[in-house]
Image (cartoon, rainbow, N blue to C red):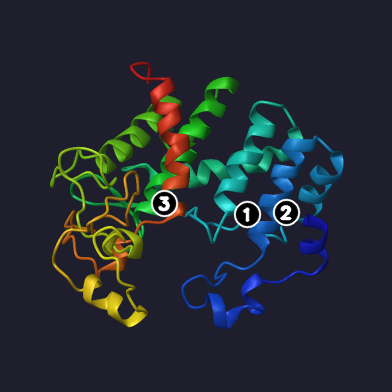
Amino acid sequence: VFQFADKYRGPYSNGLKKVVCPFYCSYSGYQDELLWGAAWLHRATRNPTYLNYIQVNGQILGAAEFDNTFGWDNKHVGARILLSKAFLVQRLKSLHDYKGHADNFICSLIPGAPFSSAQYTPGGLLFKMSDSNMQYVTSTSFLLLTYAKYLTSAHQVVNCGGTRVTPKRLRTIAKKQVDYLLGDNPLKMSYMVGYGPRYPQRIHHRGSSLPSVANHPAKIQCSAGFNFMKSQSPNPNILVGAVIGGPDQKDRFPDQRSDYEQSEPATYINAPLVGALTYLAHSFGQL
């Protein structure tokens, strides 16, 4: 698959534009996927072919570009964090630059650091953009904890100008984000459905908002589904564990089903949270 992608370069959405755009176009291009794929194949196989590929193609594929988000569309930051492990833990000197690239991302997140560019809500939530912002909260938390682990193994820190950032501080920042998500926020609202005493009741999810067959045996035609979407009643089916887009930049959350930017759950929001929660559960009380 990697060889095919490298041979026939281009965004996947070029051939599927009518089906996947505008919501799932590859806006970041194909370069990050090739770098990401090569990084994982190198880690999985230890085949020097992939290391050589990274060294030869890294710059062309955007290794040094400044990206400060990690998500389903743009994986550059994740690739840099992963490749920094090869330098920090496995002592591959040829990947030294990726430690610097990873540090730049970390410095962009540290409040008060000389190169900080991240925005936080008054309640302390990392805020990247209004559309499904929680995906960046969960992915960034996962990367912070992962990088903290690599730094600890190598007895290293991050230097952000005159600010020295330790692995412990990265863990503290990540934990604060996860705690906010789970209810430690101005609204005392858990943004994981079914968790805690207060959580979203009207998420933007068809299966959750439509009545069950037991309660509504008759078929519901596609157009009839809008009646349930527009209803102000809580969803009849609780999608336990789903994490939604979350509050706005002022910690406000209207809990409206039609507001997909804030109320829609997605696998790309939940997926990185699993890693972050696993780390925090394993190291509970030892941050």
Q: Nearer the viewer, residue 102 or 28?
A: 28
Residue visible at 52% across and 41% down in the picture? 103
Q: Are marks 1 and 2 in contact (CB under 8 Å)?
A: yes
Q: Secondary structure at mark 1?
A: loop
Q: CA distance from mark 1 to mark 2?
A: 8 Å
Q: Where in the figure is residue 178, as x and y percent of width and height? A: 32, 38
Give above or below for 24 relative to 190: below
Give above or below for 237 relative to 273: below
Q: What number is the disc on residue 108?
A: none
Q: What number is the disc on residue 58?
A: 2
Q: What number is the disc on residue 269?
A: 3
Q: Where in the figure is residue 120, as x and y percent of width and height? A: 27, 50
Residue bearing the label numbered 1: 64
Query: Alpha-carbon neighbours of circle 3 within 10 Å: few (<14), some, or many (≥20)?
Result: many
Q: Secondary structure at mark 3?
A: helix
Give the residue type at disc 1: Ala
Q: Where in the figure is residue 14, as x and y percent of width and height? A: 65, 78
Q: Is residue 58 left or right of residue 259?
A: right
